[in-house]
Image: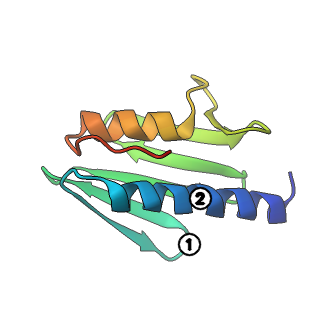
Amino acid sequence: MDDIEYGRLADAAMRRIEAGLDAAEGDLDYELASGGVLEITCAEGSKIVVNRQAAVREIWVAARSGGFHYRWDGVQWRDTRSGEELFAALERLLAEQGAGMVRFT
């Protein structure tokens, strides 16, 4: 994958995340900062940070339970260690941090 393809795929993933957060009924807030950093604040004040890492063509997620790196496998974004899909992981992480039910469909 080249830089242009990575940018297109990462942008689409970030838009999908934002759309899911916009539609969520839970108590959360988010802000997309420059450089492709998305900071999600859950009800009790904990944060989840989703960050584009263009140099390694990955998307990184930092949550209370740890840090996760996602790489495009040709079909979807997968955790480089566990193989978990990005959007399923975000739904789980948000629920664990009290954000309620968020879906990224």
The percent coordinates of residue 19 (x first, y second) are 45, 60
Task: Kindly identify the amino acid type of the residue bearing the numbered disc 2.
Answer: Arg
Asked if the residue at tag 2 contacts the one at tag 1, i.e. Cβ–Cβ closer than 8 Å, the answer is yes
Q: Report the residue at 36% width, 62% height from top.
A: 22
Crowd around label 2: few <14 · some 14–19 · many ≥20 (10 Å):
many
The percent coordinates of residue 37 (x first, y second) are 48, 65
Q: Residue furthest left?
A: 44
Please state the total of marks drawn on the protein image.
Answer: 2
Q: Report the residue at 61% width, 25% height from top.
A: 83
Q: Is residue 65 left or right of residue 75?
A: left
Determine the secondary structure under disc 1: loop
Residue holding disc 2: 52
Q: Residue furthest bottom?
A: 34
Q: Is residue 15 above or below residue 90?
A: below
Q: Is residue 76 above or below residue 51?
A: above
Q: Report the residue at 46% width, 34% height from top.
A: 89
Residue holding disc 1: 35
Q: Residue furthest top?
A: 82
Task: Kindly identify the amino acid type of the residue bearing the numbered disc 1.
Answer: Gly
Q: Is residue 102 left or right of residue 9?
A: left
Q: Report the residue at 44% width, 74% height from top.
A: 33
The percent coordinates of residue 100 (x first, y second) are 23, 42
